[in-house]
Image (cartoon, grey):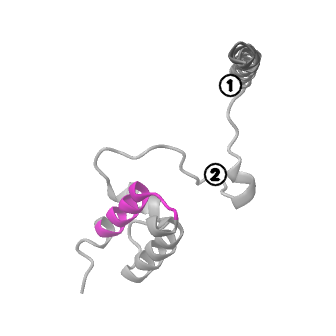
Amino acid sequence: VNANSTSTTAPPQQQQQQQQQQKAKEDSQSTEKPRENIFASFFNLGSNYYEGGFEEKMTKSEAALILGVRPSSTEKRIKEAHRKLLILNHPDTGGSTYLSGKINEAKDLLLKGKSK
């Protein structure tokens, strides 16, 4: 019985390896094309969409890009944008702790010196 069970497990393993190799081959062929931003068609992002990563030390212009406001926006507008983004990206609802931290950092940087 043991001889039969070992001989029946080998072919599925070989098939799985062949499938993984085929998938890797297809993936390498598909990476030759430039990547398309699939979210642009869903959210009508336009040309003002920022596709870069985060800077090491956040600047006011980066904070404004994160929140989607101008650096000179009012305190009310900054807080509204922060609230909307945080509701969508909150860790308690499956969002990223890193992104929510960046959103909070952006709000704090833009509100610095604007309080009454």
Question: Is disc 2 surrounded by few (<14), some (14 to 19) or many (20+) residues within 10 Å?
Answer: few
- Determine the residue positioned at 30% across, 69% down: 108
Q: Which residue is mark 2?
A: 47
The front one of 114 and 22 is 22
Residues at badges 2 and 1 in contact (C-beta under 8 Å)?
no
Q: Is residue 80 above or below residue 101?
A: below
Task: From the viewer's perspective, tell me whether residue 26 is left or right of residue 85.
Answer: right
Main SS, magenta region, reads: helix
The front one of 91 and 82 is 91
Residue 94 x/y as whole percent: 52, 63
- Determine the residue positioned at 23% across, 74% down: 113
Tag shown at residue 31: 1
- The answer to which quarter of the image holds residue 2 is top right
The front one of 45 and 100 is 100
Q: Is residue 1 above or below residue 81?
A: above
Tell me which numbered mark, 2 or 1, is placed earlier along the sequence. Answer: 1
Q: Quadrant of the C terminus?
A: bottom left
The front one of 99 and 20 is 20
Residue 86 x/y as whole percent: 46, 70
Could you tell me the amino acid type at mark 1? Thr
Residue furthest bottom in the image? 116
How far apart, in angstroms, are the residues tagged by discs 2 and 1?
Answer: 24 Å
Question: Is disc 1 surrounded by few (<14), some (14 to 19) or many (20+) residues within 10 Å?
Answer: few
- Determine the residue positioned at 72% across, 19% down: 5
Magenta part of the protein: which range? 94-108
- The answer to which quarter of the image holds residue 46 is bottom right
Local SS, label 2: loop
Task: From the viewer's perspective, tell me whether residue 91 is left or right of residue 16.
Answer: left
Magenta includes 103?
A: yes
Could you tell me the amino acid type at mark 2? Ser
- Determine the residue positioned at 48% across, 73% down: 81
